[in-house]
Image: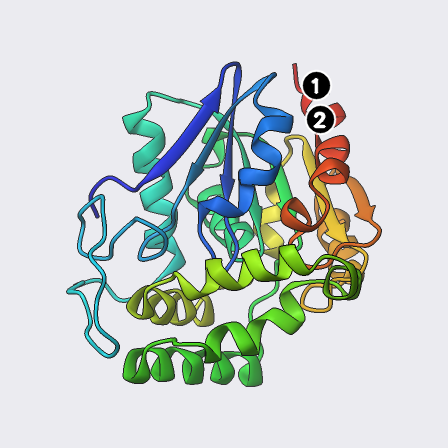
Amino acid sequence: MGPVHYIESGAGTPLVLLHAFPLDARMWNPVRGLLDDQLRVITPDQRGLGESALDGSSARSLAEPGENRRTAEHPSLDLAAADILALLDRLELPQVVLGGCSMGGYVAMAVLRSAPQRVAGLLLVDTKAVADNDEQRANRLKVADRAAREGTGGWLADSTLPNLLGSTTHERRPEVVASVRDLVYAQPADGVAWAQRAMAGRPDSVETLRSYTGPALVVVGEEDTLTPPENARELAGALSGSELVTLPGAGHLPSIESPDAFAEAVRPWLSRLG
């Protein structure tokens, strides 16, 4: 895999934020300006999504529905983690504070499994450590097959939006719903398929978290139905010395739904990291 596309701003302690599925790094834009006065905020597009391609180029070309870009590797979050580690090498960053939301959390855990010495602090947002069960895995593979066969059109946004956002956002923030719909719609079908297959095959990461002794913060939207607060409590319980923050009025994507509250939760913790 060649260089991944990323955006960075600010200066100071490097904070790498990994995005959720089926979105790209733009999901962090609402909180960027709330964090980059004290941090160097780095937001990569993960393999096959946003402007990071599957074929190793740094800028993707749009594929027609059903047309796959070439990639030799079997889909795996270990490859996605290797992309992030390669980016850290490229930026000459021996250690970073690493954060991830949903799928980004899975990739962060894969980085932690592969190279724990690179993680100076861990921020897990609306994610979980356990592997998929058989039903969840089968559903992911169905979505992957449909995306590869038909493209994503409008059906992917229609099927994911109800659970990506909390009830408060659906009821009171139509502009947020519209912006997330646009982000989902923008993702290439082959990247969507690759990501779903990679997530379907991910291992359980509970022991990985238990072995991590660095500082950790777990953030969850109170209205998240995909990885609800009980999942966040399990994550926090597996991490020694972790902190847990629940954000009211937010669902699975608090950086978009409640950016001010998200930043207010994260900034004090980051400040304590020195």
Vertical arrangement, residue 26 with respect to residue 178, above or below: above
**Residue 12 at least partly seen:** yes
Vertical arrangement, residue 95 with respect to residue 259, above or below: above
209 and 187: which one is in front?
A: 187
The disc at residue 37 is: none
Instruction: Tell me the SS state at disc 1.
Output: helix
Q: Nearer the viewer, mark 1 or mark 2?
A: 2
**Residue 241 at least partly seen:** no
Q: Which residue is mark 1?
A: 271
Q: Residue at x 50, y 83 (%)?
A: 139
Q: Position of residue 179 (x, y in %)?
A: 55, 56
245 and 28: which one is in front?
A: 28
Report the amino acid beneath label 1. Ser
Q: Position of residue 109 (x, y in %)?
A: 52, 49
Q: Residue at x 55, y 77 (%)?
A: 158
Q: Quadrant of residue 86?
A: top left
Report the amino acid beneath label 2. Arg
What scheme was used to colour the molecule? Answer: rainbow
Q: Which residue is mark 2?
A: 267
Instruction: Tell me the SS state at disc 2.
Output: helix
Q: Position of residue 50 (x, y in %)?
A: 36, 52
Q: Residue at x 50, y 49 (%)?
A: 19
Q: Residue at x 29, y 49 (%)?
A: 52
Q: Is residue 201 left or right of residue 216?
A: left
Residue, far front: 175
Disc 1 and disc 2: Cα gap in Å? 6 Å
Q: Residues within 10 Å of mark 2 (few under 14, many from 20)?
A: some
Quarter the C terminus occupies: top right
18 and 264: which one is in front?
A: 264
**Callout 1–callout 2 Cβ contact below 8 Å:** yes
